Every structure is written in structure tokens, then in C-alpha cells.
Amino acid sequence: MEQRLRLVQGGHQPRADNRISERHAIAVPGQIVWKDARGTTRMASVLTRNVSEHGVSVECLSGVPIPLYRLVYFQIDRDARNRPDLPAALRKPNVLSAIFRVGASSQVTGAPAEYALRLLVEPVRATDTASKPATAWPAQEQTRTA
């Protein structure tokens, strides 16, 4: 039984080694926009804590609580979108995202103070040079018959 548990637990690699892309500590203002259960459009002002190509951690400055796994639109303020240290997905006017972690609630507002969003963007695929032909297809000769 003990051996089985060791197999299920897997390796003891640090969490940072499992990340697809690096996180960068960047503090820029933004908004989260979503529709609640009644269909009313809601908005929350946020400040980013750290960003990566596939996710962003934000500090909520105002707004009502956002449920876990809610689909939202995340947008960086227009003035900050041109920063070269932002991932390409966050330079767009808005990015479809999902709330995948909700932090502790603030004692002042009663709403969560932190959220983690998973950016729902198409992954960038590396081009495989081995699969491409080294030369162009040879031109075929056209023969005419009488």
C-alpha cells in the first residue's frame, strides 16, 4: 500500500519547474468585465501583480465578488497596453479569460482581494523546420502530344 501511494504522489519537482512560461512582476491598471447570473454586466477595477503568456494575477481594487470559473473579459488600461514587457495577448483591447483562483476576502469590502485568471488564448506553436521540405517542389515538365 505504501509503495502505491508513492507512485500516485509523483515526483517532488518544484512548482516553478512545471510552468510553461515565466511570470513577470508587472503592476499595471486594468478591468475585469463579466455578466452575472442575471445577465447584468459587471466591472471590477484591478491592478496586475504578475503576468505570464497564459495567466495573470490581479489585486481587486473595487467591484463585487466574481465567482470561481466565471468567464470574463480582462483588459489592460489603454495607456499601459504599449509596454514592451507585456505579453502580446495583454496588448489586445480585451482577452477572454477564466477565473481559476479566488483569494482571501478583504475585511473592508467583504469581496475577494485577489484573483488569478487563465488567459484563453491560442497557444503559440513552434515551427518545425524538419517537417518543411528543404527545397521547393521541382517544376514538372509539360509535354504536349500531337
Image (cartoon, rainbow, N blue to C red):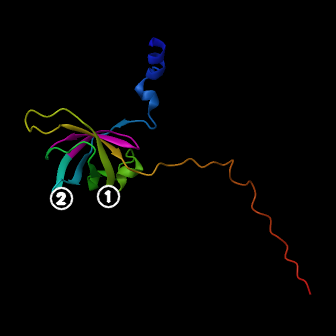
- Residue bearing mark 2: 39
User: Overall secondary structure of the magenta stretch?
Assistant: strand
Question: Which of label 2 and label 1 is nearer to you?
Answer: 2
Residue 93's tag is 1
Please identify the quadrant where the N terminus is shown.
Answer: top left
- How far apart are the two marked residues, 2 and 1, measured between alpha carbons? 22 Å
Of 67 and 45, which appears nearest the observer?
67
- The magenta stretch is 46-61
> Hey, what amino acid is under mark 1?
Pro
Please give left or right for residue 6 compared with residue 24 in the image: right
Query: Element under label 1?
Result: loop
Asked which quadrant contains residue 24, the reply is top left
Q: Residue at x 80, y 64 (%)?
A: 138
Residue 33 image position (x, y, % from top left)? 22, 53
Which disc is residue 129 wearing? none
As helix, strand or loop, the secondary structure at mark 2 comes to loop
Farthest left residue? 108
* Mark positioned earlier in the residue sequence (2 or 1): 2
Q: Does residue 28 belong to the magenta stretch?
A: no
How would you rate the neighbour count of disc 1 (Cα within 10 Å): few for under 14, some for 14-19, many for 20 or more? few
> Is residue 13 shown to the viewer in this render?
no
Which of 5/45 is in front? 5
Asked if the residue under mark 1 is in contact with the one under mark 2, i.e. CB atoms within 8 Å, the reply is no
Residue 59 makes an appearance in the image: yes
Does 99 appear above or below 146? above
Mark 2 surroundings: few (<14), some (14-19) or many (≥20) residues within 10 A? few
